[in-house]
């Protein structure tokens, strides 16, 4: 029986007289298919000489021809030099010593070049006093191959020639000479003797010239304080290796505080030697890299920091200050003070408070302590900016007093809080020139963009510390039609000398004192005689008096408490944002939050709850967070929020350096520009925060924040236990049950595998000292550069598909310390009532957690679980202790990654090179020039992982074979161990019993990651020791 | 496909040229001989020995002079005759010049100063050690009449010989075919005759129903099975063989932009491979020599003087040298670089995939392996080609059989001692050293 029901597909059908329904009944498509367009013109169809049959023949033949042609292999051309430069041998790397001085990062480095292309930055061991390469410096080589660099001089957006630019600039400058208006050079800190001389000459020629030095992230307060006290505009130099008790009030000295570069010295005393190690107390608001490494960390708001510093002064030096602090902070300050007093000249106080008084107080305490670490002979020259002068300049520009502004190495329209004022002032100038690598926020607003070369294409000299000189030399011919600022000044000064000769002359007359310039160039550095200052005597007499304590009182007076305070900071990965178009740095996970491709507001759990801000993980594990409207002095930005354990209640943090909009690829335009809040160059601001609608998607690479009491991952103990108790107490070997007998996991009878003989030849081991590792991440970028690790982008990182071969895990404790976590886990009883509840609680980081960093790469297990499950034997062990991965053999089953207990294998989900979907450096010819020719670029569908830099170990072996010699300890290096200036990573051959790594293997602190699994890794860790000594 | 035609053309023209050459040169030669005889008799008293002169010339003069070409110094063919004819200078002047040219220039000698200025103001090295006899010998050598290049002897007979061979084969085959045809027709005739006999005698031939062969085959299941297995195996064999040669370019012999003959350089002239491929000693790549390396020699070697063949004539080689000059920007007439160079785009013959790391210096310097081990008889290759298959199996086999050269190498002392004890051998192979491990070549 059929039903009479009427089925209808659309409401329209219910309409009786619908024309559409009627048409549809007749015709499938309501609109006529436009066949006429190609068939309608009968004439042309018939006029065509190609019949249908002919057409098919052509198709057939061309297909056949194409198929046949495809059978032939590609013809590869080899084009040798016409005249081969003597120093270049194809296939052999050359190293040049040079110096980066981009206004934010200053370091003497080595550049590795292959066939004339710089491909990697390494530490210059000859110039270790000039700082070492941090993550940004390591990544800076990629900036050379930035496809968005300005390729030649431009005027109002049109390309011009240098001659035209010179003519116009010189004409205008000459005209201005008589007009009475100022000519202003607004530059980064060059700290360059030759540039200073050159600018002086420029001043002489054009008369009314003003040189304003501008640091995007200002250290003006510290400079002013030092200048007032010691008569020299420099920064105090601290040698942390001479400090045994370090108290830091808001100074992120392992990060970018006062130019950074203090971590190597700091790490030296963190390794317990003869039962001693340094004690580090940190008072801070944001959870910084430094705070994470501290033995004791006290979270407090910026206004409390000022108070704490003043009180510290009064407890150490004397004098009374008013004001009160919460009891726990007061207590911590008192204890810190007593420790400092006890330490005497072994003590050191540093502060990051942007306040002249605060900086003076710190200097005075160090003076009082007579701190050995305070090196007055060699103050640091790498920041010279003056807030006051910049402010005056902006006012003058607005008033029309500035005729010409020539900028180099600065981007004020991005980095100034009052950028609009500057922009307005810029319009009042007759001439504006910006020397810039990019068409960035500032240079796109100036009349002229003078295309500047990258530092790897430039000459230069730097006085990093007083008397410590460094040279910059080009490692490649300029890729584009660029000219550096100094070269232009020479031309505008009508000086025909090249800048190279100019430097040579300056050095010859005033620096080298008879030493060879070529030797200095080869070394990259020169230590001159450090003349004592003339003002020193007067200063010393002043210093003998007891400090008055005025500064401390003034500091207290300046405290203004507010409900919520914002602390602006710079990330170790992004700095001041100069290198925002560098995909390596964008994908570099922040050591603390483990989040890449973003900046965000860090909020304490307490404040987040009060404001209704949340973080949560979505179904695929990725992190999402609320947005917040953040308002500082009337300016509002909508910023995503991350709830940060350890963030001081009543404070929020936000990183500078993000939110760039010009001169970078769309993918790199991440985050918000926090410089808008950088009012009066002060890094702490009064702020209001409120919940904003929407959810932000983060690219966070670590989903689990706490250690959950798993003491076998990070072994940690206190100095007291370490010194007094037996090794088994704090670093015992895990036991497994064999025939109901507890047996150490290292004993052969519990082993599933046959032992493999590695006693002959080399056996590589890598030791990572958790005490010396500060988590800075230089190794991560060095690994990227050495091993052609691809960048995958934010969306892929969010899916946990990041490709970092080396990650630095960061763990928080759930209780105040990891030890308490372990106890809590152990003591919890009963699955439903106790343990489950306890574990759930432990997932949340403490309000002020203990933090630990742990670099993890392939552990190169002697008994590798990945090898046994590979169906095609693509991964296998070697005699030398490295676990090999043959990419060409891999079929991509990913069994190995599943079976790896350390989760260090990385899968190429996509083709990451020459693929428009991944428009990072490997997608353009220029960016690919950075690739290391000794390491293959992996394709889609294969697994990859740390190779323990086998290309480097093999090269060392080959060099020794060629020379017919034995390899010395220290010759073997991996990219990460070479990049680690802190001495946390030591690589070498344990079959060489005299090697450092062989000794570290026998060290009491040595343990293997997840030793109980029995994988016998070739990477070992040194137990973290915390100095909890109070008093 | 194109090549045979090309060579055919070249053959034709060359043959013609050679014939003309031969005639001409013969005439010339006899004339010259007569002339020489007459000349040498008249001057024999003063003349030296041209053979001795040649060796002296090569030892002392050839660095800057050639007989027929202006180089660092002037061309020296018949220098004595030229000097006496042009400037009226005698042999004594030549003695003085050779022994101390600088002194002669200083003395204000007109011709000496003229030559001095003409050749860029560089005085000729003094040769005080040359005796009068030596100089006589050299002058005798320079006075020799230029010998025509010994043209290649006619090689036309070659083709005919091979042609003869072909005809004889055909004849034999034809004869055989005729024989078989005769046999077949004979059998047919016999068969017919027998049948007709049978018919005549009324003998009934049994009419056996023979199953056709294909049916019998199809019915025999065992045979079908065996055949199909055989066919499958055979096809698998060929498919495997086909697949295995994909990407193997053994014998790859591309046409290069400049015809560079390894035979002439490494073979005939016995130049060490590493003179040009110098980076093979220290680098992973052997390095294609840059043009300045070529010009080290070719500045003075402007023509080919070696053996020639029909296909590769002197003109052909000289034209290739001209190509090099064009690329290097060398003006041969003016003996100077124009600065107008053009890099040569050679076609790379040996292409390893990206995922293989191969280091020349490891094999050449450390292991001391001859280039020919992998590159074949390169010194005999007129056109270079890929000799080895460059497959992984080929690498591995060599690593299995080749002993590591550990002598006089301090690096190996310890490891060799320990490993040879472990394996109980005197000499370790590369494989025993770990040369089979994946990561040694793949990273």
Image (spheres, helix red, strand yellow):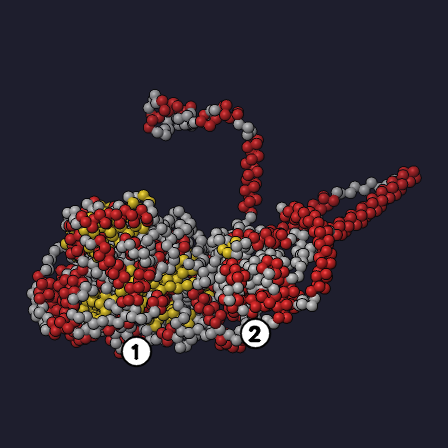
Residue occupying the point 18% across, 66% down: A232
Residue occupying the point 73% across, 53% down: B27
Given the current orientation, which residue lies at the most extreme top position? A17
Above or below, A386 relative to A517: above
Residue A263 in percent (x, y) is at 27, 67
- Residue that mark 1 sits on: A726
Asked if residue A989 can be seen in this view, the reply is yes
Q: Chain of mark 1?
A: A
How much space separates mark 2 and mark 1, taking CA atoms? 49 Å
Q: Is residue A404 left or right of residue A665?
A: left
Residue B174 in percent (x, y) is at 80, 46
Residue occupying the point 23% across, 49% down: A174
Q: Chain of mark 2?
A: B
Query: In this orientation, which residue lies closer to the viewer: A312 or A227?
Result: A227
**In the rendering, which numbered label is found on residue B427?**
2
Q: Tell me the SS state at disc 2.
A: loop
């Amino acid at each position: 029986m059929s039903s009479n029901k009427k089925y209808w597909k659309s409401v329209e059908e219910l309409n009786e007289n619908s024309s559409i329904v009627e048409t549809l009944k007749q015709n499938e498509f309501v609109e006529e298919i436009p066949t006429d367009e190609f068939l309608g013109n009968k004439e042309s169809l018939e006029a065509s000489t190609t019949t249908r049959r002919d057409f098919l023949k052509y198709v057939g033949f061309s297909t056949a021809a194409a198929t046949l042609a495809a059978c032939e292999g590609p013809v590869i051309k080899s084009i040798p030099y016409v005249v081969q430069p003597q120093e270049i041998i194809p296939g052999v790397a050359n190293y040049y010593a040079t110096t980066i001085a981009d206004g934010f990062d200053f370091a003497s480095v080595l550049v590795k070049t292959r066939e004339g292309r710089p491909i990697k930055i390494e530490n210059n061991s000859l110039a270790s006093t000039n700082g070492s390469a941090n993550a940004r410096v390591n990544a800076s080589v990629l900036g050379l191959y930035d496809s968005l660099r300005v390729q030649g001089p431009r005027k109002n957006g049109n390309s011009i020639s240098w001659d035209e630019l010179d003519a116009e600039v010189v004409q205008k400058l000459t005209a201005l000479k008589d007009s009475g208006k100022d000519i202003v050079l607004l530059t980064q800190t060059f700290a360059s003797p030759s540039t200073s001389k050159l600018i002086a000459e420029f001043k002489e020629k054009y008369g009314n010239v003003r040189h304003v030095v501008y640091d995007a992230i200002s250290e003006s307060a510290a400079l002013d304080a030092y200048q007032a006290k010691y008569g020299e505009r420099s920064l105090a130099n601290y040698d942390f290796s001479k400090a045994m008790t370090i108290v830091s009030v808001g100074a992120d000295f392992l990060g970018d505080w006062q130019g950074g570069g203090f971590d190597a010295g700091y790490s030296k005393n963190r390794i317990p030697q003869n039962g001693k190690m340094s004690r580090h107390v940190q008072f801070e608001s944001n959870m910084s890299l430094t705070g994470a490494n501290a033995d004791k960390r006290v979270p407090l708001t910026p206004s409390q920091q000022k108070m704490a510093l003043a009180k510290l002064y009064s407890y150490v030096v004397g004098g009374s200050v008013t004001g009160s602090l919460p009891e726990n902070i007061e207590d911590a300050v008192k204890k810190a003070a007593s420790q400092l007093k006890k330490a005497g000249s072994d003590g050191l106080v540093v502060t990051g408070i942007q306040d002249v008084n605060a900086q003076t107080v710190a200097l005075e305490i160090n003076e009082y302590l007579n701190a050995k670490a305070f090196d007055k002979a060699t103050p640091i020259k790498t920041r010279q900016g003056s807030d006051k002068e910049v402010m005056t300049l902006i006012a003058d520009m607005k008033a029309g007093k500035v005729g010409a502004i020539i900028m180099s190495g600065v981007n004020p329209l991005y980095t100034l809080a009052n950028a609009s004022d500057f922009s307005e002032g810029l319009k009042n100038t007759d001439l504006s020139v910006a020397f810039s690598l990019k068409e960035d926020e500032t240079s796109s607003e100036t009349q002229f963009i003078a295309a500047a070369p990258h530092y790897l294409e430039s000459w230069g000299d730097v006085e990093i510390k007083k008397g410590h000189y460094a040279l910059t030399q080009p490692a490649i011919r300029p890729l584009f039609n660029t000219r550096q600022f100094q070269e232009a000044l020479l031309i505008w000064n009508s000086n025909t000398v090249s800048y190279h000769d100019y430097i040579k002359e300056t050095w010859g007359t005033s620096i080298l004192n008879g030493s060879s310039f070529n030797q200095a160039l080869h070394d990259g550095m020169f230590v001159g005689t450090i003349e004592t200052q003339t003002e020193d005597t007067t200063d010393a007499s002043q210093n003998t008096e007891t400090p008055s304590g005025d500064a401390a009182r003034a500091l207290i007076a300046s405290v203004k408490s507010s409900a919520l305070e914002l602390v602006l900071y710079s990330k170790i990965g992004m700095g001041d944002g100069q290198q925002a178009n560098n995909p390596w740095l964008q994908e570099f996970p922040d050591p603390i939050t483990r989040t890449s491709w973003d900046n965000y507001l860090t909020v304490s759990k307490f404040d987040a709850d009060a404001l209704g801000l949340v973080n949560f993980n979505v179904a695929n594990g990725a992190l999402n967070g609320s947005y917040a409207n953040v308002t500082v002095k009337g300016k509002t930005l909508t910023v995503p929020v991350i709830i940060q354990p350890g963030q001081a209640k009543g404070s929020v943090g936000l990183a500078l350096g993000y939110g760039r909009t010009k001169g970078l690829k769309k993918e790199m335009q991440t985050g918000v520009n926090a410089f808008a809040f950088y009012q009066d160059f002060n890094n702490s601001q009064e702020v209001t925060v409120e919940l904003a609608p929407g959810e932000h998607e983060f690219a966070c690479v670590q989903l689990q924040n706490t250690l959950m009491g798993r003491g076998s991952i990070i072994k940690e103990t206190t100095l007291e236990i370490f010194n007094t108790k037996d090794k088994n107490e704090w670093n015992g070997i895990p036991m497994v049950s064999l025939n109901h007998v507890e047996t150490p996991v290292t004993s052969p009878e519990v082993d599933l595998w046959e032992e493999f003989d590695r006693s002959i030849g080399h056996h590589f081991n890598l030791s990572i000292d958790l005490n010396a590792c500060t988590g800075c991440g230089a190794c991560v970028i060095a690994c990227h550069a050495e091993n052609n690790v691809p960048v995958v982008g934010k969306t892929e990182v969010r899916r946990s598909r990041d490709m970092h071969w080396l990650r630095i895990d960061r763990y928080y404790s759930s209780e105040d310390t990891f030890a308490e976590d372990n106890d809590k886990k152990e003591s919890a009883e009963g699955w439903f009532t106790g343990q489950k509840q306890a574990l759930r609680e432990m997932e949340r980081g403490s309000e002020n957690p203990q933090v630990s960093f742990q670099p993890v790469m392939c552990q190169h297990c002697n008994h590798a679980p990945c090898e046994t499950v590979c169906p095609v034997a693509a991964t296998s062990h070697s005699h030398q202790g490295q676990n090999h991965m043959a990419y060409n053999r891999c079929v991509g089953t990913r069994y190995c990654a599943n079976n790896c207990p350390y989760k260090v294998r990385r899968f190429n989900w996509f083709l990451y090179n020459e693929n428009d979907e991944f428009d990072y450096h490997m997608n353009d010819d220029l960016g690919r020039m950075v690739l290391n020719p000794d390491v293959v670029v992996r394709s889609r569908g294969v697994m990859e992982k740390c190779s323990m830099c086998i290309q480097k170990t093999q090269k060392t072996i080959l060099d020794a074979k060629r020379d017919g010699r034995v390899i010395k300890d220290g010759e073997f290096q991996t990219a990460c161990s070479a990049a680690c200036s802190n001495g946390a990573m030591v690589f070498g051959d344990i079959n060489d019993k005299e090697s450092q790594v062989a000794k570290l293997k026998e060290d009491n602190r040595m343990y293997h990651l997840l030793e109980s699994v029995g994988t016998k890794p070739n990477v070992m860790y040194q137990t973290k020791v915390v100095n909890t000594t109070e008093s | 496909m194109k090549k045979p035609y090309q060579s055919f053309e070249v053959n034709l023209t060359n043959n013609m040229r050679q014939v003309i050459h031969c005639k001409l040169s013969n005439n010339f030669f006899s004339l010259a001989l007569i002339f020489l005889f007459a000349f040498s008799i008249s001057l024999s008293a003063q003349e030296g020995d041209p053979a001795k002169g040649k060796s002296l010339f090569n030892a002392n003069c050839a660095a800057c002079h050639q007989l027929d070409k202006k180089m660092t110094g002037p061309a020296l063919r018949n220098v004595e005759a030229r000097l006496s004819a042009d400037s009226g200078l005698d042999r004594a002047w030549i003695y003085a010049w050779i022994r101390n040219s600088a002194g002669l220039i200083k003395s204000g000698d007109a011709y000496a100063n003229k030559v001095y200025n003409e050749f860029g103001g560089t005085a000729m090295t003094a040769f005080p050690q040359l005796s009068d006899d030596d100089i006589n010998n050299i002058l005798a050598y320079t006075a020799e009449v230029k010998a025509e290049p010994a043209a290649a002897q006619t090689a036309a007979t070659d083709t005919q010989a091979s042609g003869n061979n072909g005809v004889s084969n055909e004849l034999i085959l034809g004869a055989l075919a005729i024989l078989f045809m005769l046999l077949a027709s004979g059998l047919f005739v016999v068969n017919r005759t027998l049948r007709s006999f049978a018919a005549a005698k009324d003998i009934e031939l049994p009419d056996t129903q023979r199953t056709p062969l294909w049916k019998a085959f199809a019915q025999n299941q065992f045979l079908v099975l065996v055949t199909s297995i055989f066919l499958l195996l055979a096809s698998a064999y060929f498919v495997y063989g086909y697949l295995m040669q994909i990407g193997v370019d053994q014998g790859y012999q591309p046409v290069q932009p400049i015809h560079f003959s390894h035979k002439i350089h490494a073979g005939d002239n016995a130049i060490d491979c590493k003179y040009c491929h110098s980076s093979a000693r220290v680098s992973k790549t052997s390095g294609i020599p840059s043009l300045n390396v070529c010009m080290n020699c070719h500045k003075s070697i402007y023509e080919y003087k070696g053996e020639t063949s029909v296909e590769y004539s002197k003109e052909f080689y000289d034209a290739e040298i001209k190509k090099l000059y064009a690329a290097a920007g060398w003006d041969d007439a003016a003996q100077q670089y124009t600065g107008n160079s053009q890099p040569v785009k050679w076609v790379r013959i040996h292409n390893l995939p990206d995922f293989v790391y191969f280091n020349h210096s490891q094999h050449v310097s450390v292991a001391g392996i001859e280039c020919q081990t992998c590159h074949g008889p390169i010194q005999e290759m007129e056109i270079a080609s890929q000799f080895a298959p460059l497959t992984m199996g080929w690498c591995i086999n060599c690593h299995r059989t080749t002993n590591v050269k550990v002598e006089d190498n301090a690096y190996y002392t310890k490891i060799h001692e320990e490993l040879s004890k472990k394996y109980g051998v005197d000499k370790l192979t590369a494989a025993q050293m770990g040369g089979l491990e994946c990561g040694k070549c793949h990273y």
